[in-house]
Image: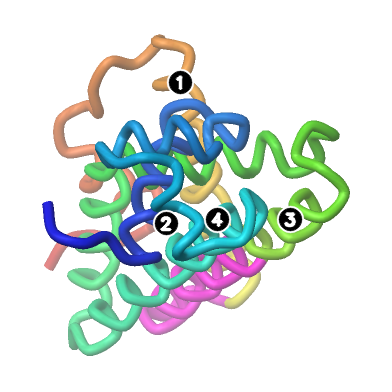
Amino acid sequence: MGRLNADDWARAALEALAEGGLAAVAVEPVAVRLGVSKGSFYWHFPNRQALVEAALERWEAGTDEVIARLEPVPDPVERMRTLLEWAFGDGRDAAISFRLISEVDDPAAGPVVGPKVGAVVRRVSERRLAFMRAVLEEVGQPPDEAARRALTAYGGYLGLAALARIGAVAQVPEDLAGHALEELGLRPR
């Protein structure tokens, strides 16, 4: 592995977060994950809080990147299908989303990290819901119905992450995206 940069640390911190929550985002375990000494960490970050913040920024940027890739897809049903296939196929993001939402008010997060986690989770969730609502409105659903259906679908996504977390679901059922499209009131074209 070449020289690490701050983004490498942030990505490794996200992996740790997906597996063990905010408590797993600590300098030594992330250094071990990267195969480096913890001294390497201090070239990039002054403390753990800065690492958590960088990981949160990376996660938020990932949502913006996915949406930016989807926005040019001309067919709204195909745009939603692609989003759902990505969402249900990426257990890591689902795990991160679920863990952050679950731990947003955990006192162990600390007085500085906790509110930052809450703000990022809120922005990401709002951005995802807004994107889904906009697609549903584009296909002709009234705003209230589009909002309700987007909320139901996002809740299902987080619920699946919760079930995976407790071991009740080992893998995503086949064509879950297709079933979710039907629940959203969209028929594949």
Q: Amino acid at mark 2?
A: Ala
Which contiguous range is marked in magenta? 123-142
Q: Residues within 10 Å of mark 2 (few under 14, many from 20)?
A: many
- The Cα–Cα distance between marks 1 and 3, rounded to whole angstroms, is 20 Å
Relative side of 47 to 18, left or right = right
Give coordinates of residue 104: x percent, y percent: 73, 44
Which mark is on residue 62?
Answer: none
Give coordinates of residue 55: x percent, y percent: 49, 57
* Discs 1, 2 touching: Cβ within 8 Å: no
Q: Is residue 138 above or below residue 105?
A: below
Circle 1: element type: helix
Q: Earlier in the sequence, mark 4 or mark 2?
A: 2
- The Cα–Cα distance between marks 3 and 4, rounded to whole angstroms, is 16 Å
User: Which numbered disc, 1 or 4, marks the residue closer to the eye?
Assistant: 4
Circle 4: element type: helix
Residue closer to the observer: 140 or 158: 158
Residue of label 3 = 118
Q: Earlier in the sequence, mark 1 or mark 2?
A: 2
- The Cα–Cα distance between marks 4 and 2, rounded to whole angstroms, is 6 Å
* Discs 4, 2 touching: Cβ within 8 Å: yes
Residue of label 4 = 51
Q: Amino acid at mark 1?
A: Arg
User: Which numbered disc, 3 or 4, marks the residue closer to the eye?
Assistant: 4
Examine the rendering and report whether any part of residue 165 can be seen.
yes
Q: Is residue 52 above or below residue 188?
A: above
Relative side of 125 to 156, left or right = right
Kindly identify the residue that appears in the image at 21 percent across and 47 percent down: 178
